[in-house]
């Protein structure tokens, strides 16, 4: 640091500050190149390039486009019993949270954290209401 800082300052004065600015399209192209090289010893992983690409596309997407209609989501009635069939459907869904409703599927009362089902035994047919449900603030 004691040697590199003064040298850096002198070089900044001599060469100037040439900062590279990229347009969104240029960044997308750069990320695309990195995604093709992901897993081949490159600096960015496939997951990282996916996240960066998604962030760049975020300004073009509306909230409506990002959301899933409630009619299309997998949800559970609060009075349902957690048997083998229901537990299988929850696991097959692949989500970490499942909406829980009371009576009408549009009346969401909270979210069931799938990891909380680790202690639930399907043969006991525990009701959903007996499992910890995260309430949704209204």
Image (cartoon, grey):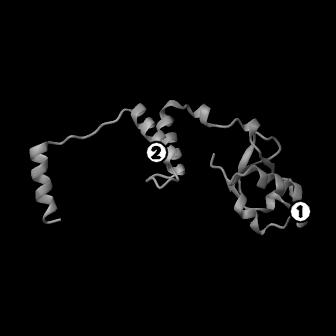
As displayed, is residue 32 above or below residue 121? Answer: above
The quadrant where residue 116 appears: bottom right
Disc 1 secondary structure class: loop
- Spatial CA span between label 1 and label 2: 49 Å
Count of picture labels: 2
Residue 101, numbered circle: none
Label 2, residues with CA under 10 Å away: few <14, some 14-19, many ≥20: some
As displayed, is residue 9 above or below residue 72? Answer: below
Residue nearest the viewer, comparing 71 with 29: 29
Residue nearest the viewer, comparing 118 with 38: 38
Does residue 83 appear in this view?
no
Label 1, residues with CA under 10 Å away: few <14, some 14-19, many ≥20: some
Residue in view at x 50 percent, y 30 percent: 60
Labels 1 and 2 touching (C-beta < 8 A)? no
Does residue 37 appear in this view?
yes
Disc 2 secondary structure class: helix
Question: Where does the image place residue 121, in percent across and percent down from the top left?
Answer: 84, 67
According to the picture, the residue beneath numbered tag 1 turns out to be 125
Does residue 125 appear left or right of residue 44 in this picture? right
Residue nearest the viewer, comparing 32 with 1: 32
Residue in view at x 13 percent, y 66 percent: 2
Question: Where does the image place residue 46, in percent across and percent down from the top left?
Answer: 53, 49
Question: Where does the image place residue 96, in percent across and percent down from the top left?
Answer: 68, 55
Quadrant (top left, top right, bottom left, bottom right) of the C terminus: top right
Residue in view at x 49 percent, y 47 percent: 37
Question: Where does the image place residue 73, in percent across and percent down from the top left?
Answer: 74, 41
Quadrant (top left, top right, bottom left, bottom right) of the N terminus: bottom left
Q: Looking at the image, tell me whether mark 1 or mark 2 is earlier in sequence order.
A: 2
Residue 34, numbered circle: 2
């Amino acid at each position: 640091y004691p040697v590199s800082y003064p040298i850096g300052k002198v070089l900044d004065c001599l060469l100037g500050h040439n900062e590279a600015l990229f347009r969104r399209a240029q960044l997308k192209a750069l990320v695309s190149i990195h995604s093709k090289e992901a897993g081949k010893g490159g600096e960015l992983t496939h997951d990282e390039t996916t996240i960066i690409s998604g962030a760049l596309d975020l300004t073009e997407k509306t909230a409506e486009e990002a959301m899933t209609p409630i009619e299309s989501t997998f949800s559970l009635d609060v009075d349902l019993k957690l048997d083998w069939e229901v537990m299988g459907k929850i696991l097959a869904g692949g989500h970490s949270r499942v909406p829980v409703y009371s009576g009408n599927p549009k009346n969401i009362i909270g979210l069931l954290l799938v990891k909380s089902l680790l202690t639930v035994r399907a043969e006991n047919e525990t009701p959903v209401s007996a499992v910890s449900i995260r309430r949704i603030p209204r």
